[in-house]
């Protein structure tokens, strides 16, 4: 018996145009079997177009996609039956109950009625929908519809699951439930999650893929990506005046030359191992220049910092 490939999904040279707009530009990456991959990018980066191609919902203009070593065709075909998808726009049956929806989808994927019933009850319990098992889809709150949307994607125990903003609209307790269940699937399923929540991506993903303008910027572990900023904490100095650039000459010598400090309007940001000795000098320089300190922040590096470093803007811009 041939062992299953270590690569669950391989995208090679994906390209997609919409008229003159290049949405995806020669994008190549691999997703390992059993991992949770965070898929990040600003609005217009091409991640939704990429996800649609990876699911077999949209044909690429060029390039190829393999699922477990087999080519993926438009519409998915036999390979597509191993995929589960929970889109950002909630897709449920409004006039069916939660239990009926899950059982129906299970039957469509070939589960026998008893097996479909057991799996439906299991997912209703996982996502806290037991008391709503007989409620129609249209009567559910937005958060409950989101949980049902995710449960539907998992009904047939797919080998690869695509979750597009799975925690959008969820209350804090539900976010934890969804996050922990997704993490529990790692190893048995391969999960690809798009999210605008950098903190959530850090908690959830084994590796993170960041794209912009349809191109791959980085694909690595969270710690590996953070290392691109160099060692040390992140220091942010906020001035009342829009004169942060006047402090650059003071902090530049104690920062990594490959990761220079940035100054935008009234905010100076830099990463350094020598912040404790540097901050008093910064404060004195602010006073000497006749400027005024608005705020001072010291914190560990985050994915948001790397994202800004790579793209020049925040994720939601």
Image (tube, rainbow, N blue to C red):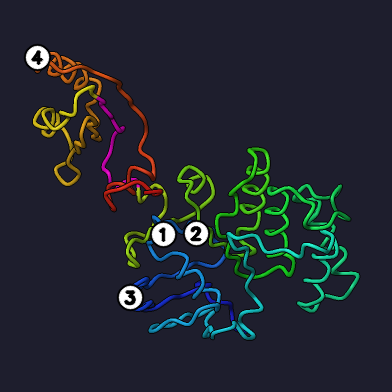
Asked whether disc 2 touches disc 3, contact meaning CB atoms under 8 Å apart, the reply is no
State the separation of the CA atoms marked 1 and 3.
Answer: 15 Å
State the separation of the CA atoms marked 1 and 4.
Answer: 44 Å
State the separation of the CA atoms marked 4 and 2.
Answer: 48 Å
Question: Where residue 37 is drawn, which disc sits there?
Answer: 2
Would you identify the image quadrant in which residue 296 lies? Answer: top left
Question: Where residue 26 is drawn, which disc sits there?
Answer: 3
Horizontal side, residue 12 vs residue 106: left or right? left
Indicate which disc, 1 or 4, sits on the residue closer to the N terminus: 1
Considering depth in this image, is 105 or 11 the residue closer to the camera? Answer: 105
Badge 4 local density, few (<14 within 10 Å), some, or many (20+)? Answer: few
Up-down relation of residue 252 to residue 55 (above or below): above
Asked whether disc 2 touches disc 1, contact meaning CB atoms under 8 Å apart, the reply is yes
Labels 2, 3: front one: 3
The residue identified by callout 4 is 288
Q: Residue 308 in the image: x percent, y percent?
A: 30, 46
Who's the residue at 74% across and 66% down the image? 155
Badge 3 local density, few (<14 within 10 Å), some, or many (20+)? Answer: some
Q: Residue 129 in the image: x percent, y percent?
A: 80, 50
Horizontal side, residue 284 vs residue 228: left or right? left
Indicate which disc, 2 or 1, sits on the residue closer to the N terminus: 2
């Amino acid at each position: 018996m041939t062992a299953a490939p270590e690569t669950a999904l391989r995208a090679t040279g994906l390209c997609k145009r919409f008229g003159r707009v290049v949405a995806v530009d020669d994008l190549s990456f691999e997703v390992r079997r059993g991992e949770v991959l965070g898929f990040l990018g600003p609005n217009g980066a091409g991640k939704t177009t990429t996800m649609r191609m990876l699911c077999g919902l949209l044909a690429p203009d060029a390039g190829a996609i393999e699922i477990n070593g087999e080519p993926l065709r438009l519409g998915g075909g036999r390979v597509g039956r191993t995929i589960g998808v929970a889109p950002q726009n909630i897709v449920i049956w409004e006039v069916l109950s939660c239990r009926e929806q899950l059982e129906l989808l299970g039957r469509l994927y070939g589960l026998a009625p008893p097996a479909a019933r057991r799996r439906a009850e299991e997912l209703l319990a996982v996502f806290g929908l037991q008391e709503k098992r007989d409620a129609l889809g249209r009567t559910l709150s937005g958060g409950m519809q989101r949980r049902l949307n995710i449960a539907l994607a998992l009904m047939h125990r797919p080998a690869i699951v695509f979750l597009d903003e799975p925690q959008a609209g969820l209350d804090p307790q539900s976010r934890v439930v969804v996050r922990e269940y997704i993490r529990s699937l790692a190893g048995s399923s391969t999960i690809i999650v798009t999210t605008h929540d950098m903190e959530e991506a850090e908690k959830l993903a084994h590796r993170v893929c960041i794209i912009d303008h349809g191109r791959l910027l980085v694909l690595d572990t969270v710690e590996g990506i953070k290392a691109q900023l160099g060692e040390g904490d992140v220091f942010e100095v906020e001035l009342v005046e829009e004169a942060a650039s006047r402090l650059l000459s003071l902090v530049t010598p104690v920062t990594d030359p490959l990761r220079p400090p940035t100054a935008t309007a009234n905010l100076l940001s830099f990463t350094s191992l020598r912040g404790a000795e540097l901050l008093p000098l910064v404060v004195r320089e602010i006073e000497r220049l006749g400027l005024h300190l608005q705020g001072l922040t010291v914190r560990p590096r985050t994915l948001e910092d790397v994202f800004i470093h790579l793209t020049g803007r925040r994720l939601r811009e």
